[in-house]
Amino acid sequence: MNQIAFFGLGNMGGPMAANLVKAGYKVRVFDLVPESVTKLVELGAESAATPSEAVKDADVVVSMLPAGKHVHGLYSQLTEQPNTLKQGALVIDSSTIDVATSKNVCQLLATNNVSFIDAPVSGGVAGATNGTLSFMVGGSSEHFELAKPLLEKMGKNIFHAGEVGAGQIAKVCNNMLLSILMVGTSEALQLGIDNGMDPTVLSEIMSKSSGSNWTLDVYNPCPGVMETAPASNGYHGGFMTDLMLKDLGLAMDTASKSSSSTPLGAIARNLYAMHSRSGAGTKDFSSIFELLQGK
Ligand code: NAD
């Protein structure tokens, strides 16, 4: 694994690629936003003018793109001309996308003698920056073992979820639960505030009581409670409302295919859709707190 190509240097991909550079890998990067590329080049990455140039001689290709259409578009383009991707290379897609697209891209690459795993992540921008992400990998055991040393440079917990697509299933289950916890935490905090409680005091109490959860502990949605949380930075950075809405759409599609009952997931999806339509699509997903405040 000498040469790595990295696509998508946004909130997550930027710090993930930076950790690979810091670990000593040769990383060639491509993004549509020139400023994001410049940041990585300053850290020691090489820039590529086109996707084909980025994958030249790459043993591993990592993608961290917004949605399935971007992932499918990229790998369709790279497989249009034979031998653009190195024979025997491994593609690691860490974007959160639908299972059907993951499987489709896997097949597309297999006909070009390139392997594929889906490896979506959890842990947010802080996890990406600190190299403590959780990876949920779908693919063969052989490809999982091959990717593991590289994933360990970007994450702390590397799970083998099952065959191709299983990583995406684990990810949508996790994010559906996360959205429900974020809405519930926001609701409880606002109830306390409306009844005269200081949100910092209430957060401390709940995080040491049976209501404790990740959103209270590291991602408090109420501005001013947690200095490092996006809520205290005007809900900038972090994980966009529109990306959470996309993930909840994926969860609902998955539930529909398996006839699963997901009533709270459906409510969370509707709340996030309402929030997005009110103009909050690019704000961090913890800004759902503002919807419950009645802002
Ligand atoms: P982002 O919008 O900040 O970054 C996406 C990047 O991809 C942008 O820089 C964009 O320019 C680039 N891009 C789009 N199309 C491209 C193409 N064809 N070639 C190269 N670059 C292209 O999004 P993000 O927050 O980094 O999220 C990326 C993925 O990770 C999403 O699937 C999201 O659901 C998932 N995710 C995000 C978080 C989070 O906390 N932000 C956490 C876990 C998973």
Image (cartoon, rainbow, N blue to C red):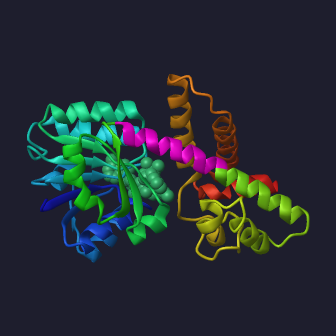
Q: Position of residue 44 (x, y in %)?
A: 23, 74
Residue extent of the magenta highlight: 165-180
Q: Is residue 4 left or right of residue 38?
A: left
Q: Is residue 170 left or right of residue 143?
A: right
Looking at this rendering, what residue extends furthest in the right direction?
Answer: 195
State whether the magenta stretch is mostly helix, strand or loop.
helix
Picture quadrant where residue 36 is located: bottom left
Q: Is residue 79 left or right of residue 220?
A: left
Q: Is residue 97 above or below residue 145?
A: above
Observer able to see residue 29:
no
Q: Is residue 242 above or below residue 283?
A: above
* Magenta highlight on residue 17: no
Residue drawn 62% across the image and 71% down it = 233
Q: Position of residue 101 (x, y in %)?
A: 36, 33
Residue drawn 21% across the image and 64% down it = 27
Residue drawn 27% across the image and 49% down it = 92
Quadrant of the image containing the N terminus: bottom left
Q: Position of residue 112 (x, y in %)?
A: 13, 35
Q: Position of residue 274 (x, y in %)?
A: 70, 42
Q: Is residue 181 left or right of residue 126?
A: right
Q: Is residue 26 above or below residue 271?
A: below
Observer able to see residue 279:
yes
> Considering depth in this image, is 145 or 100 the residue closer to the camera?
145
Looking at this rendering, what residue extends furthest in the front direction?
Answer: 210
* Magenta highlight on residue 179: yes
